[in-house]
Image (cartoon, rainbow, N blue to C red):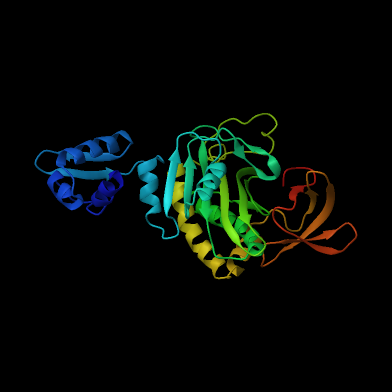
């Protein structure tokens, strides 16, 4: 109900709307409208209330909460639901639980993750109210073998979002890390459930370091936040810009039109043209990063001088002497 009231107020930005108008439009009592308006004010929405005139939305909240998340996702036909949690173990784990329960497509956002997940079994630090911690649950009608490229889709969309909101140059470490000044600000973890020729669902987990001021000693040399890089923005604005960019990029992906996204990756890559380490849980070898292909794979020249394709999820690509 709060989301419907917000939508009604947003549709009348320059006018006061009476409680009677809202109650008739939504089919609820004026007392119920008053209670929901009071709750919206408590969530940070600036709503002016004037006797005999009604209510007017002065400004939206900069915070992500249940009401603001629902308002955002209502703009996108590929999102059926939005779930906000002040604290959760992992947004990816929650998205997978929802997928198993039969939920369609949507987004899970949290103010804090207590057991955030990174690639290759690593843990992702997700302090309370310092970042954008989210996961998308998607069910595209695609063959599982083409799905790995969706990590590049999400990375391109988040890079576009950050650069649109901040005067900062973002680099992409293939396939899933965003970096600023050589340090990581964002990581992406894509997981899926599939059979040989049938995809059940994809979960794309994204963590963006927005406002952290300190990192553990073992991370300080390779991790940073937008705040530490001189950029101040709200996770809500970042989420809105990301979904706007992702909707466009995802549409291109579904239509097998990846050329713009691949060109974007190449122009932002901090991996291409460098010697890199290819790391798995049990092995480590050297290679030279040559190209990013239309299917999202990375072409490298191995130590024997031969070219080979590396696909997302198979290895971690790292710099020789530093993170990138």
Which percent across, then down, holds residue 8? 24, 51
Quadrant location of the N terminus?
top left
Q: Nearer the viewer, residue 99 or 69?
A: 99
The reply, left or right, for residue 270 in relation to residue 41 is: right
Q: Which of 215 and 256 is in front in this view?
A: 256
Residue 167 is at least partly visible in this image: no
Q: How many marks?
A: 0
Q: Name the residue rendered at 61%, 53% in the picture.
A: 192
Q: Which residue is drawn at 35% across and 41% down?
A: 61
Locate residue 96 relative to residue 298 in the image: left or right: left
* Residue 125 or residue 26, whichever sits in front: 26
Question: Residue farthest to the right?
Answer: 304
When asked about the image quadrant of residue 63, the answer is top left
Pick the residue in front: 264 or 136.
136
Task: Give x and y (percent) for residue 285.
Answer: 85, 50
Residue 274 picture location, percent across and down? 77, 55
- Can residue 250 be seen here? The reply is yes
In this image, 298 relative to 194: left or right? right
User: In this rendering, would 227 be left or right of 61?
Assistant: right
Vertical position of residue 23 compared to residue 77: above or below? above
Q: Residue at x 33, y 36 (%)?
A: 43
Outermost residue to the left: 52
Q: Position of residue 153 (x, y in %)?
A: 58, 59
């Amino acid at each position: 109900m709060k989301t419907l009231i917000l939508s009604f107020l947003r549709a009348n930005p320059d006018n006061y709307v009476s409680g009677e108008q809202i109650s008739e439009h939504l089919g609820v009592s004026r007392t119920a409208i008053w209670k929901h308006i009071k709750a919206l004010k408590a969530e940070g929405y600036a709503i002016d209330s004037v006797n005999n005139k009604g209510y007017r939305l002065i400004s939206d909240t900069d915070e992500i909460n249940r009401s603001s998340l629902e308002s955002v996702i209502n703009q996108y036909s590929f999102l059926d639901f939005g779930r906000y949690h002040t604290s959760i173990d992992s947004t990816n784990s929650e998205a997978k639980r929802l997928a198993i329960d039969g939920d369609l497509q949507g987004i899970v956002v949290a103010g804090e993750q207590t057991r955030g997940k990174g690639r290759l079994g690593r843990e992702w630090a997700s302090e309370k109210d310092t970042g954008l911690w989210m996961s998308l649950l998607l069910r595209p009608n695609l063959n599982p073998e083409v799905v790995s490229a969706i990590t590049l889709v999400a990375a391109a969309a988040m890079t576009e979002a950050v650069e649109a909101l901040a005067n900062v140059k973002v680099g992409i470490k293939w396939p899933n890390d965003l970096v600023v000044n050589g340090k990581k600000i964002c990581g992406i973890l894509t997981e899926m459930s599939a059979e040989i020729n049938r995809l059940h669902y994809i979960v794309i987990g994204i963590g963006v370091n927005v406002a952290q001021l300190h990192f553990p000693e073992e991370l300080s040399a390779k991790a940073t936040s937008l705040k530490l890089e001189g950029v101040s923005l709200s996770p809500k604005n970042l989420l809105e810009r990301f979904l706007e960019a992702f909707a466009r990029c995802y549409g291109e992906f579904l239509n097998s039109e990846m050329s713009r996204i691949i060109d974007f990756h190449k122009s932002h890559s901090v991996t291409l043209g460098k010697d890199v380490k290819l790391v798995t849980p049990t092995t480590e070898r050297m290679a030279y990063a040559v190209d990013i292909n239309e299917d999202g794979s990375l072409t490298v020249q191995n130590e024997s001088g031969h070219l080979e394709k590396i696909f997302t999820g198979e290895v971690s690509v790292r710099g020789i002497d530093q993170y990138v």
